[in-house]
């Protein structure tokens, strides 16, 4: 890519760091450029070019690549989807923050992965629309998004059959899961480091069929996804 060309992306803020007197270093998750680090000159002095840069909203950004392959230069950031309800709901915000961390952890720099951006935006939109329904709704949506994200990143968790012999897992029994091997592993196949009890599997089915499931089990599922993301950190 040539330095100086004006590029565009749809983007969410992953991280903001003040730099020197008036500047901001802004890391973005984008639709077609993966993760992107930009320098926003003067962003803390004037909001003319950048409006106010806050997380959880979607921006249309214009930027130029740096010649040396370092930070890109942010030229313009325009709000395209404002999510005011989400940005004022602490539970929803912490759920959104966890989803953004997952994408940041799994998404390579400057490599396009539009589907990861899509599932993240869908989660934020769901939290914006139905965030008042409380933490258990939000955690269920997070679990669904996390399973989709792992699949997109190539680390799908197979929880309905053994990853070694493909034998279906008995529905009402606990099972061992190996995060490195990507799902349930039967005893003959070597088992896994973590024992999951039946309610977690019931929660999986509930989430996919009805969109909701029992809170404690969903929380355990979110923890499992969180650990799987950590195992596969880029
Ligand atoms: Zn097996």
Image: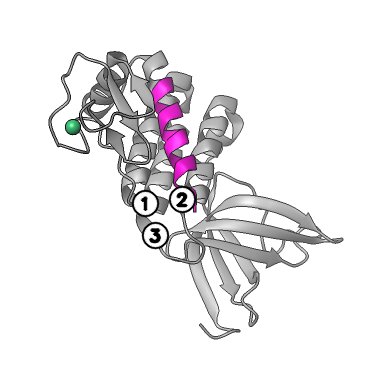
According to the picture, the residue beneath numbered tag 1 turns out to be: 153
- Write the residue at 85% across / 61% down: 20
Question: Residue 198 appears at what percent x and percent y?
Answer: 27, 15
What segment is highlighted magenta in the picture? Answer: 219-234
Left or right of 113? Residue 104 is right
Question: Residue 172 appears at what percent x and percent y?
Answer: 19, 13
Marks 3 & 2, CB-CB < 8 Å contact: no
Q: Is mark 1 within 8 Å of ligand 1?
A: no
As drawn, the label of residue 113 is 3
Which mark sits nearer the N-terminus, 3 or 1? 3
Tell me which corner region of the image, top left, top right, bottom left or bottom right, holds residue 140.
top left
- Write the residue at 39% across / 51% down: 116
Q: Residues within 10 Å of mark 1 (few under 14, many from 20)?
A: some
As drawn, the label of residue 106 is 2
Q: Residues within 10 Å of mark 3 (few under 14, many from 20)?
A: many
Viewer-side residue, 141 vs 110: 110
């Amino acid at each position: 890519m040539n330095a100086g060309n004006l590029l565009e992306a749809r983007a969410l803020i992953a991280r903001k760091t003040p730099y020197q007197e008036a500047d901001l270093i802004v890391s973005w998750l984008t639709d077609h450029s993966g993760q992107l680090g930009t320098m926003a000159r003067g962003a803390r002095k004037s909001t003319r070019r950048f409006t106010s840069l806050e997380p959880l909203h979607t921006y249309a950004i214009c930027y130029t690549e740096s010649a040396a392959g370092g930070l890109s230069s942010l030229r313009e950031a325009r709000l395209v989807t404002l999510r005011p309800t989400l940005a004022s709901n602490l539970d929803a915000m912490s759920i959104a923050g966890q989803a953004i961390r997952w994408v940041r952890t799994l998404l390579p720099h400057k490599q396009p992965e539009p589907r990861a951006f899509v599932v993240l935006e869908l989660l934020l939109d769901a939290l914006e629309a139905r965030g008042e329904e409380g933490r258990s709704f939000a955690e269920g949506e997070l679990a669904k998004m996390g399973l989709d994200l792992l699949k997109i990143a190539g680390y799908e968790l197979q929880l309905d059959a053994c990853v070694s012999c493909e034998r279906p897992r008995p529905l009402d029994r606990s099972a061992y899961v190996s995060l490195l091997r990507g799902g349930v592993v039967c005893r003959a196949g070597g088992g896994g480091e973590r024992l999951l009890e039946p309610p977690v599997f019931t929660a999986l089915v509930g989430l996919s069929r009805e969109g909701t499931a029992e809170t404690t089990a969903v929380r355990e599922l979110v923890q499992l996804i969180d650990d799987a993301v950590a195992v596969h950190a880029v």
